[in-house]
Image (spheres, rainbow, N blue to C red):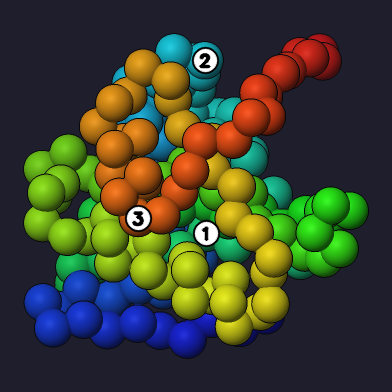
């Protein structure tokens, strides 16, 4: 599932992440997990998880928004199958724009790229996991068409 590079008028590009991006991706995840209540920042675990996605593109994609060589945002799109929808669906995680770059439309651009990718590849649904305590992110995604579900995520931690 190749992804077409998206270039915008402000010199930012949206491209799939590569292994060379790991240090910047890990830093973004560390910032994200410091804000969220369910996760502990751990650079070794974040690196391991990112590599599992980057080295196995049939499992998902990580898109980044770059301004020159600096990554200012990322999103993790994981691929799974929905029996309810009868096809592939995206699970959206780790959506973050660097705090100094927020409020400038980069999140909307990155989310638009996700939606376009999903439509081009005939995904049936995008499911988003967002932190309950983050009204700002919930409002952002709500404005972009996401709706609250009657489903409630539950977890069983193993090992």
Q: Secondary structure at mark 2?
A: loop
Q: Residues within 10 Å of mark 1 (few under 14, many from 20)?
A: many
Residue identified by numbered label 3: 144
The image quarter containing residue 100 is: top left
- The answer to whether 104 appears left or right of 46 in the picture is left
Between label 1 and label 3, give the one nearer the viewer. 3
- The N terminus lies in quadrant: bottom right
Measured along the vertical axis of the image, is residue 78 above or below residue 87?
above
Q: For the C terminus, give its image quadrant.
A: top right
Residue 67 on image: x %, y %: 18, 68
23 and 31: which is toward the camera: 31
Residue 86 appears at what percent x and percent y? 86, 63
Q: Is residue 8 left or right of residue 84?
A: left
The answer to which of marks 1 and 2 sits earlier in the sequence is 2
Name the residue beneath numbered marker 2.
38
Question: What is the secondary structure assignment of the residue under circle 1?
Answer: strand
Disc number at residue 74?
none
Mark 2 surroundings: few (<14), some (14-19) or many (≥20) residues within 10 A: few
154 above or below 52?
Answer: above
Residue 78: percent from the left, percent from the top? Answer: 66, 53
Q: Is residue 55 visible?
A: no
Q: Residue at x 46, y 32 (%)?
A: 130
Res 104 quadrant in image: bottom left
Q: Earlier in the sequence, mark 2 or mark 3?
A: 2
Judged from the image, the secondary structure of the residue bearing numbered disc 3 is loop
Image coordinates of residue 133 in percent, x first then y, are: 36, 17
Give how far apart the Cα atoms at labels 2 and 3 are: 24 Å
Local crowd at mark 3 within 10 Å, few (<14), some, or many (≥20)?
Answer: few
Residue that badge 1 annotates: 62
- In percent of the image, x 41 and y 71: which residue is there? 113
Which residue is at a point 41% across and 36% down the rendered structure image? Answer: 29
């Amino acid at each position: 599932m190749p992804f077409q590079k998206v270039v915008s008028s402000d010199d930012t590009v949206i491209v799939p992440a590569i292994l060379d991006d790991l240090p910047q991706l890990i830093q973004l995840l560390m910032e994200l997990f410091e804000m969220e209540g369910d996760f502990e920042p751990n650079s070794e675990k974040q690196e391991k998880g990112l590599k599992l996605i980057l080295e196995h593109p049939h499992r998902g994609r990580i898109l980044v928004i770059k301004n020159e060589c600096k990554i200012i945002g990322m999103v993790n799109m994981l691929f799974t199958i929905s029996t309810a929808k009868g096809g592939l669906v995206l699970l959206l995680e780790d959506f973050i724009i660097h705090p100094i770059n927020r409020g400038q439309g980069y999140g909307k651009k990155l989310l638009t790229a996700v939606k376009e990718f999903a439509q081009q590849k005939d995904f049936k649904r995008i499911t988003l996991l967002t932190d309950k305590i983050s009204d700002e992110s919930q409002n952002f995604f709500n404005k972009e068409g996401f709706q609250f579900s009657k489903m409630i995520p539950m977890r069983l931690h193993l090992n």
